[in-house]
Each structure stands twice: as structure tokens, then as C-alpha cells.
Amino acid sequence: IQSKLPHIGTTIFTVMSKLATDESAINLSQGFPGFGADPILLELVGNYTREGYNQYAPMAGISELRTALAEKTRITQGYYPSPEHEVTIVSGATEAIFCAVSALVRKDDEVIVLEPAYDSYEPAITLNGGIPVYVSLNSADFSVDWEKVKSAITSKTRAIMVNSPHNPSGFVWSQSDLDTLEELIRDREIYVISDEVYEHITFDGLRHLSLGGHSGLRNRSFVCGSFGKTFHVTGWKIGYCIAPAALTVEFRKVHQYVTFSTVTPIQYALAEYLKISDRYLSIPGFYQKKRDLFAEGLAETGLKLISSHGSFFQLASYGHLSQKSDRILAVEMTKILKVACIPISVFYSNQQDDKIIRFCFAKTDQQLLEAIKRLGELN
Ligand code: PMP
Ligand code: GLN
């Protein structure tokens, strides 16, 4: 068969997690929590499955969850999207991103991608006949160089993909980033696909600013989120897309033929949980402690850290210690030191190797301390 994605292999997350298992290493590669969800939420899922909520949910998601999510959005971002016309429940942010790209991108449309970028964006664009146009983030802190974005815009630009808090760097956008983006696209028909899966994981008093909360960006943005990240349940694969009514109509046309609808009992459980618990508000404090614990220990190993202000990832550069490629270093570290990480060259279109590796610190303190101890052997 002639491949439609000849350049794509198995994702690095699958590769490194498998290697970590094979090598019995501490897995700080693929991003998922090493601890459980709130037992109350788990109980609710059990209850709803036993009570018979096990058949197809409505295509757009159950109205109770869409309403609960709209209410959470009002509390955290100060605007209330219409549950009926602007909120869709999907099977993870990956699906939200894929459906948004498919709804928007036509053959030969250009889509601006800020890199390093999460690995699902590019295949979604190419499968839809679009052309990814890459713009590098600033190398020191992974902030956006808006002049570069401006020069990448052409008459063929259909969309821009953005991601704050950023995977892999943890960079968090400021109000001025949002304002500048709005200015750049104001007089053009350019849409924004905003990957906000780490919306509740920000540190140092920074607050996540959703594009949906920006009056000039809301009318052209698909805001993609993930309950998996927020409630420590990545395996549930449930997320959402918030977009203005006209865009949601197009989004749902795709969603209804990609998955049709999303797992029913978990939707009921999340809807009820969101009504009775605002535990998501305590996530920044919870993860900031982990970031601090991990970063302090990691700095002692001789690696140079790049400050993480959000997400559950910490970048570290090692070029002053070794000239090995990041992929080789990641594999060796897993095999010899028994700690797995992600080489970040995989997040670049040209596989650019700046000798930086990514660690996931969404793990128990015990796991983090043991990993630091093992990484002490680095130099
Ligand atoms: N975007 C980013 C930046 C991510 O890190 C992830 C992580 N899994 C996703 C999207 C996908 O989220 P989900 O698991 O809900 O599909
Ligand atoms: N988002 C996770 C990460 O960046 C991985 C999810 C996946 O394996 N597709 O590590």
C-alpha cells in the first residue's frame, strides 16, 4: 500500500513507555499520572455503569456534562459558552484536535504550527491535504516570536495551532501573547486551534488564559481540552471542544463520523463530580510541589533546567555533559540508569537536536526521589 503518512512511525510515547517497561525503569517519559483519581469520582463511574447508563450517549455529549463544563468555564475563564451550541464532548483532546483540523483544513491550506509541537498536529494537517508551516519558538524559554509568526502568514493561511501551557516546555502564554495573536489575525480569515489540555496545571501564580476568554479570539477559536489531565485519568480518553456555534456545527459534522459519541457512564460521573467538587482548583498547588521537589533534585544532577511554569513536564539540557544525540541518551538512560524520558527532537519537523530531554513529574514523591537518586550517576 502507498502510505498516506510515509514519514510517520510509532509515536515516541509508545516507544519509550515500552522500553521503560521492558527495562523495569521508572517511567518519566509518556505523560500520565503515577497516582490515582479521587475515589469519589471512581465511585460515581461504578454507580452509573451499574445503574445501566451503558448505551450510546447523544452525539454532542450529555447535556448535564456540557452544562457543568460551561459552568466551570464561567468560573475559571469568565465566560459561559452555550452548552447546546458551543460545547461538544469528545473522546480525548486528540479527537478534538483531529476533528477541528478536519473541519477547517482544505487541500493546500497552510496551517501554522509553533514548534516544538505535540506530535498529533502534523498528521492531522497532512491527512486533510493541508501544509504545515513551522515557526520555531524562542530557544531560551519557548516563548513565541510574534515577528516570525507574522512573516509566516500568507494568503493561504487557514489556521494556527497553539498550545498553552505548552508541551514539552511548560511555557505559559500571557495576556500580551493573546492580544498579539488577535491583532495578527484580526483582518484575516484565520482560525485558531487552541490545545489547552494543561489548563489547570500552572505554577508561580500564573493563571491559564483560555483563548475562549478573549473577546477578540473567541469567535474564531476551537478550544480543545482533556478531562484526562485534569482528573488524573488519561486512560479514560474523554475531552471536549468549545467553539462558537458556526464552528461547532462544522466540528460536529466530523465528530459524528469519527466516533459519533463518547463513553456514557463516565460523562454522567464527570457531570455529577463537577457539580459537587471544585478540586480542580487545588491542582496548581498540588503539581507545583511536585515540580519544586523534582526540579531541586534534578538541578543537583548537573543537568541544566529550563523553567517550567505549567503542564507536568520539566525540560533539562545536557549538551555541557555529553554530545550524544537526545534519542541515544534517552535510550541509554532508560537501560543503564533505569529512568525513562522523552528526547525532544521528536517534537521538531526537522528533528532538530538541541540536547534537551523531557521528564514527566506527575508521579509519586517516592518515584520522583528515586529517579533523582538514579540520575545522580549521570556525570
Ligand atoms: N495535547 C497535548 C499537548 C498533550 O500533551 C496531550 C496528551 N496526552 C493531548 C493533546 C491529548 O490529550 P488526550 O489524551 O485527552 O487525547
Ligand atoms: N500527551 C502525552 C505526552 O506528551 C502522551 C499521550 C500519548 O501517548 N499519546 O507524553
Image (tube, helix red, strand yellow):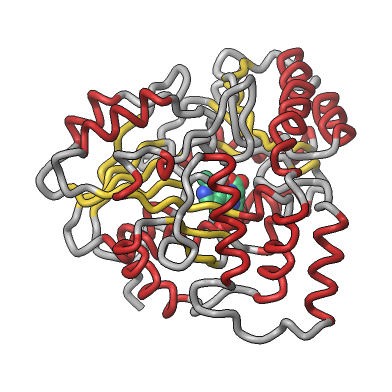
Q: Residue at x 80, y 21 (%)?
A: 377
Q: Quadrant of the N terminus?
A: bottom left
Q: Residue at x 52, y 59 (%)?
A: 240
- Horizontally, residue 64 falls left or right of residue 373, namely left
Q: Residue at x 38, y 53 (%)?
A: 222
Image coordinates of residue 75 in percent, x first then y, are 59, 42
Image coordinates of residue 74 in percent, x first then y, are 54, 45
Q: Residue at x 74, y 39 (%)?
A: 362
Name the quadrant containing residue 314: top right
Name the quadrant containing residue 139: top left
Q: Looking at the image, how many numbered discs can be counted on the residues? A: 0
- Horizontally, residue 304 falls left or right of residue 147, namely right
The answer to whether 106 is drawn above or below residue 206 in the figure is below
The answer to whether 4 is drawn above or below residue 361 in the figure is below
Image coordinates of residue 157 in percent, x first then y, are 18, 47
The answer to whether 109 is drawn above or below residue 287 in the figure is below
Compare residues 271 and 57 and report the one nearer the observer: 271
Q: Residue furthest left?
A: 155
Residue 69 seen from this side: yes
Q: Quadrant of the C terminus?
A: top right
Image coordinates of residue 76 in percent, x first then y, are 57, 40
- Horizontally, residue 6 falls left or right of residue 93, namely left
Compare residues 147 and 245 and report the one nearer the observer: 245
